[in-house]
Image: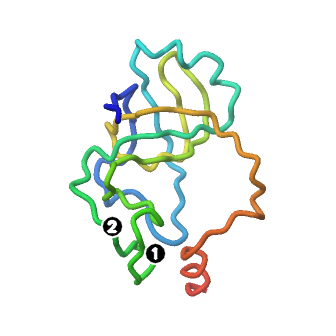
Amino acid sequence: MFTSRAIGFVSSPYKDASEIPKGLGAKHEADGVLKILPEFEAGLTDIGGFSHLVVLWEFDRAQGFELLGTPPSDNRAHGVFATRSPRRPNPIGLTIVELLRREGVELHVRGVDMLDGTPILDIKPLLSSTPSETLRRGWLAEAEAGRR
């Protein structure tokens, strides 16, 4: 096991979880800033060449966890590992954002779905060789089909 430590914090327009778009058709288009702590600035070298980043972060305001939960996009319970619920055994979030620009230790991004002040655990460039037509969306596809 390891002990996580923040490499920075999110500056986001969302002050309360109720403000973050959720459910079917939710779009995450809000701009934000990933403010990296100065001691980690060297780790941002060459990051500007990537269009999208995977951000690992901590659900620092989540309380406890539940293995089954009903997401806002369906009326059936699903396992926590088949959802994006914040109530997880390890409160780790993952978001893919578009990198707009870098200004020193600040990464200006689009697509934040985190609360303002959320601790950032890691950042990785998005590299995927999985063609979109081969991705399956599980129960979410069924919920979306039922909405039409």
Q: Sequence order check: which comes first, mark 2 or mark 1? A: 2
CA distance for labels 2 and 1? 17 Å
Provide the residue designation for mark 2.
67
Specify whether 148 is left or right of 5: right
Q: Residues within 10 Å of mark 2 (few under 14, many from 20)?
A: some
Question: Residue 55: image x %, image y %?
Answer: 50, 39
- Farthest left residue? 63
Q: Residue at x 52, y 32 (%)?
A: 123
Q: Is residue 46 above or below residue 34?
A: above
Does dot 1 land on a helix, a strand or a loop?
A: loop
Question: Residue 81: image x %, image y %?
Answer: 44, 62
Q: Is residue 38 above or below residue 20?
A: above
Q: Nearer the viewer, residue 115 or 82?
A: 82
In the rendered structure, which amino acid carries the disc numbered 1?
A: Ser
Q: Quadrant of the C terminus?
A: bottom right
In the rendered structure, which amino acid carries the disc numbered 2?
A: Leu
Colour scheme of the picture: rainbow
Specify whether 90 is left or right of 41: left
Specify whether 120 is left or right of 15: right
Observer-side mark, 2 or 1, equals 2
Question: Residue 129: image x %, image y %?
Answer: 76, 47
Q: Residues within 10 Å of mark 1 (few under 14, many from 20)?
A: some
Provide the residue designation for mark 1.
73
Specify whether 82 is left or right of 64: right
Q: Residue at x 68, y 36 (%)?
A: 51
Question: Residue 137: image x %, image y %?
Answer: 62, 69
Does dot 2 land on a helix, a strand or a loop?
A: loop
Q: How many marks?
A: 2
Q: Residue at x 46, y 70 (%)?
A: 23
Q: Nearer the viewer, residue 133 or 32?
A: 133
Q: Residue at x 56, y 84 (%)?
A: 147
